Image (cartoon, rainbow, N blue to C red):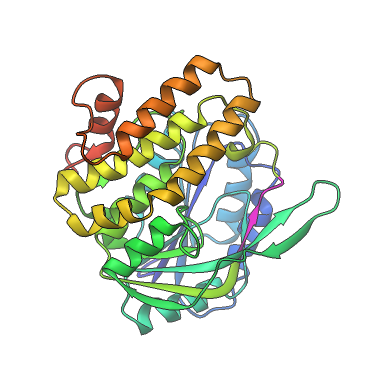
Amino acid sequence: MSNPKISLILPVYQNESTLHRALDSVFSQKTTIPYEVVAAIDPCQDRSLSILQEYQAKYPNKMMILAPEKRLGNAKCRQFAVEQAHGEYVAFLDADDKLQENFFAKMYEAITKYDADMVSCAFYVVKGQKKEWHFVYPFRRHAVLNRRGGLNAYFSDAALRGFMWAKLYRRSLFLLTPTLALPHLSDMFEDQALNTALLSHCHKVVLLSSPLTYYYKNIPTSLSSVKRQDRAMCHLRIFALQRYFFEQTGDKEGLSAWKKHIFRAKQSFRYDLKIDRKNGASASSLKEVKVLWHDVIDLKKPLPKEGALAEWLAAAFIASRDKA
């Protein structure tokens, strides 16, 4: 489609059971705003690609399919799709979630009205396997925030969460550097890393209290449902990466916001330790990650310049698009 205002980015991998629901929610939007759907599908063995092709045949002027030959993972699929998109603004939808029918209209209205770089809305949480039920995520508010306010809201992790969905971004943010991209397919919490970099470039952020999307927490095959023994280490790397990013860029305002809300990060870290322990992580590995945690949050100590963590941080920090 020529000159869309919004590009909806849809990363897909083994999503045949939920893909119809996600796509129907996009193409049933009640809006006159021109939009396109950019689906980036990793190689998979289910019917996901054929489902995408069905919708492309039905909406040929609104849908683009990107199908890399080797698996990229969600983070790189999103970036690849953003670079191919045409919209002035981009939104993201996981293939197991869905949008409210007024998502585009409300989000576009807010981002243009306030000339914002990012808009984040409230959402419904869907649970239940045999009988679905949903509720509105309770930590929501309406606000127009400057850069400092946006960073503080982000690190408080309440009304402004770390995931890519439930947001509308100015697409140019994704073309700026420095940025962050996790180096390995097995890495978790890539959304939190990328949003840290994006918010560092945002001058104005709008929060909407209206729930405009549905987050399904009842999908047994979703990444968040997979049992792992290294959640705490994965999350610790993100905390370290956020500190590393602000130190590398000399962003005192960002580092101050990160430091101010360490207590919130500590809550997440303790939760992850509990999950790792439940999933069978060894006492020695849990002790190791606890020691590293205290080093990461102690700003009097420099982050390690050698070793596995230092190499991972350097790989995730992208100083230029050429390196990306």
Residue 189 percent location from the top left of the image: 45, 41
Residue 216 magenta: yes
Residue 286 magenta: no
**Residue at point 33% right, 61% down?**
151
Can the viewer see residue 41?
no
Look at the picture and state if 145 lies above or below 162. below
Q: Name the residue at the bottom extreme.
A: 113
Look at the picture and state if 279 lies above or below 33. above
Q: Main secondary structure of the magenta part?
A: strand
Q: Is residue 323 left or right of residue 30?
A: left
- How many numbered marks appear? 0
For the record, the magenta segment spans: 213-218
Residue 168 lies in quadrant: bottom left
Can the viewer see residue 151?
yes
Q: Is residue 190 left or right of residue 129?
A: left
Residue 263 percent location from the top left of the image: 43, 50
Residue 238 lies in quadrant: top left
